[in-house]
Amino acid sequence: MSFFEKFKVTLRKDHQQHFLIGLAVGLIGLAIEGYYFFMLLYWPTLLAIQTIAYGIELIQNYIPYRHVDATDAFATVAGGVTGILLFELILDLFYRFSV
């Protein structure tokens, strides 16, 4: 068994969807904040991502035929943090090569 087979990470399709939603919320949230406030504010975006992620899981408690899973919320928050880091990397590269 190779190193990659031993530590292979498999994600369910549901977790992938939550990750991509978090990624989109992170990128769009920072883009909107940067446009309106002319600075990067990470806390409101992180708070929005966590509220959306855990709020959806709480709402699913009251909807029939839905499975509540805390790892879905974690995948959404992880995607949002990845989106914030990606946005910061894009801005860093843009300003580094534009000077």
Image: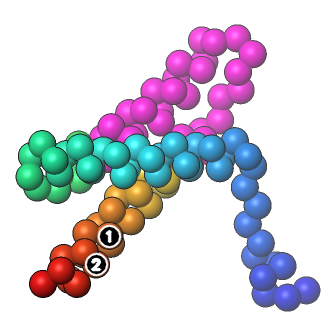
- Callouts 1 and 2 close, C-beta under 8 Å: yes
> Does 21 appear above or below 2?
above
Looking at the image, which residue is at 65% across and 35% down?
A: 69
Which residue does the numbered mark 2 point to in the structure image?
A: 93
> Does 88 appear above or below 16?
below
Tag count: 2
Which residue does the numbered mark 1 point to in the structure image?
A: 90
Disc 2 residue type (three-letter): Leu
42 left or right, relative to 4: left
14 left or right, relative to 6: left
> Does 82 appear above or below 38?
below
Q: Is residue 59 visible?
A: yes
> In the image, residue 15 lies at what x, y percent?
66, 46
Residue 18, located in which quarter of the rendered image? top right
94 left or right, relative to 11: left
Q: Quadrant of the N terminus?
A: bottom right
Which class describes the residues within 10 Å of circle 1: few (<14), some (14-19), or many (20+)? few
Task: Give the magenta part as a residue range.
Answer: 46-75
The mark found on residue 61 in the picture is none
Q: Find the residue positioned furthest to the front.
A: 98
Looking at the image, which residue is at 51% across and 27% down?
A: 56
Which class describes the residues within 10 Å of circle 2: few (<14), some (14-19), or many (20+)? few
Looking at the image, which residue is at 32% across and 70% down?
A: 90
Disc 1 residue type (three-letter): Ile
